[in-house]
Amino acid sequence: MSVQSISFGKKLIGHCKVVYAEDKNKINADIWELDSKNPKDLKDVEYSKTAGKSIYYDMYREFIKGADIPSYKFYMVTNGSTGEVISCAQTSVHLSRENKNAFKYLLIDELEENKKYINGADVILAYLANDAQNDNSSNCSDKIRTAFTDRLQGSLTRMKFIKRKSGIWELPKKTMKSTVDSAKEKHQLEINY
């Protein structure tokens, strides 16, 4: 007997405050984990000026390929009033070896930020750091690495990422808790468990 996977759509995983660039006012925002098997989530990404640029193609590939293949995870931060996309991310989990030590790391494959908001990338980075350090998470990781270049250097620096000599931006596990604690205070980050 074959069992079909059931898709429930995006899941609200947190709340935060982001700063609207034009008037510097803080607004309420919601953090979502998207369901790559849900057609509505796929359409939300496709028509988003922010998310559509980077994660739509990979989300579409996840949508059509089936549930047995290891997948990306997709996240989006939206304006709590208008639903406008503030930032979005695509992640995957990898194993690596440095010297003789093997470790697991969360790779941020894509990260986009709507320029109408000042700290949209910061809150999604903080959420990912919280998820990566959580022992109950399937993403429990020793490090977070980024696949993108220096275009989000301000956010990466504010969120305590370190640029390695290789050019890779990385957040070690020992810094994740302070990164999350700082975001909880500064951006009123609340994470749904």
Image (spheres, helix red, strand yellow):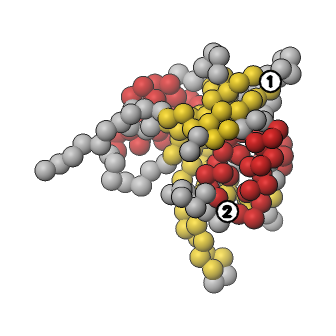
Q: Is residue 110 above or below residue 168?
A: above
The residue that mark 1 highlights is: 26
For the C terminus, the image quarter is: top right
Q: Give x and y (percent) for residue 178.
A: 79, 55
Q: Nearer the viewer, mark 2 or mark 1?
A: 1
**Mark 2 or mark 1: whose residue is earlier in sequence:** 1
Q: Quadrant of residue 125?
A: top right
Q: Secondary structure at mark 2?
A: strand
- For residue 68, side relative to residue 2 (left or right): right
Q: In this view of the protein, which residue sits in the foreground, 87 or 135?
A: 135
Query: Three-letter amino acid code at disc 2?
Result: Lys
Q: Give x and y (percent) for residue 142.
A: 65, 66
Q: Residue at x 82, y 38 (%)?
A: 186
Q: Residue at x 34, y 39 (%)?
A: 64
Q: Residue at x 72, y 38 (%)?
A: 189
The residue that mark 2 highlights is: 143
Q: Give x and y (percent) for residue 20.
A: 79, 22
Q: Can residue 53 be seen from the camera position used here?
A: no
The span from disc 2 to disc 1 (Cα, nearest Å) is 30 Å
Q: Quadrant of residue 174?
A: bottom right
Q: Residues within 10 Å of mark 1 (few under 14, many from 20)?
A: some
